[in-house]
Image (tube, rainbow, N blue to C red):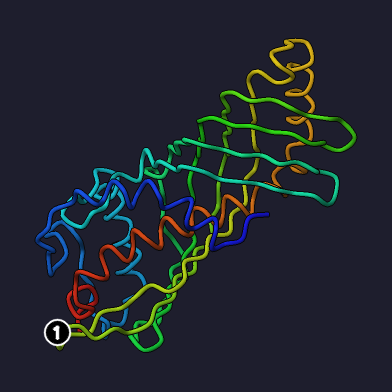
Amino acid sequence: MRTPAEAASAATALLVAACAVAAAAAPNELPSTFKLCHRSQPDVAQCITDAFQSAVPELKKGLPAFGVYSIDPLKVTQMLIDQGDGPVNIKLDFTDQTFTGFGDITVKDVKVNLDPDNFHIDAKVSIPNLDLKGKYQIDGKVLVLPIQGKGNSDLTLKDVICDVVMTGEPVEKSGEKYVNIKDFKINFETSRLYLTFENLFNGDKALGDNMNNFINENWDVILKELKPGISDVLGAIFQDISNRIFSKVPYDKIFLP
């Protein structure tokens, strides 16, 4: 399995390149459409839940002034699954992938520590359908059967529930306090994974159809091997998106005193 650092580098390559053309003048406050919360208010966790939920449509449109582009669709340059142990023994390279579905996120169960010296937010989010389409190359074995191919792929996860943990550390810039998001972890579960790999076995339709049927019958085994790579990539992307906002807006203008 690719290390988290390698996954982060591969996942954010396209985002970094795209953001190089973002507006040079960095804003120093959130867009007026963003809901703001006071750190001292009694219902701060619920306020932040509502704030995150109201930000989803804005993130779907993108925030070019912050160098943030649409999260739906969300582009990923590469995810590499290199699994050499267990029932699934494959090297699976996803490239030029597009996630759709993040625009339908529902945010709930938010827990917060808004002390900038110990910044920590836990949340649970649900997504009805998360689809991943792009190119793939695979070689190895699934259970006892060999698998090999290269072409287009389509993965659909149903009823996705994600546990999100975001932690940060304070940074002083020009006499003001900011927060650097140092870690963004995403762990997810799904009620069903559907997989389609085109052009398996050099385009042999009979073998390809049989293998697609087989891996869909054993989707839970496949998901166990795919999950760490997907989680690492998404965590790296959303950490980068978060820091493009947190690095430009002082902490007291994101979470009011």
Identify the residue at image location x=19%, y=71%: 249
Identify the residue at image location x=79%, y=27%: 214
Image spot of residue 19 (x, y percent): 26, 51
Residue 248, image quadrant: bottom left
Question: Farthest top residue?
Answer: 205
Question: Farthest right residue?
Answer: 144
Q: In this view of the protein, which residue sits in the foreground, 41 or 189?
A: 189
Vertical comparison of 216 with 256: above or below: above
* 114 relative to 67 in the view: left or right: right
* 101 relative to 84 in the view: left or right: left
Identify the residue at image location x=58%, y=28%: 153
Q: Quadrant of the N terminus?
A: bottom right
Q: Quadrant of the C terminus?
A: bottom left
Residue 240, image quadrant: bottom left
Image spot of residue 161 (x, y percent): 55, 52
Residue 89, image quadrant: top right
The residue identified by callout 1 is: 174
Image spot of residue 99 (x, y percent): 45, 39
Query: Judging from the image, what secondary structure is the residue with disc 1 in?
Result: loop
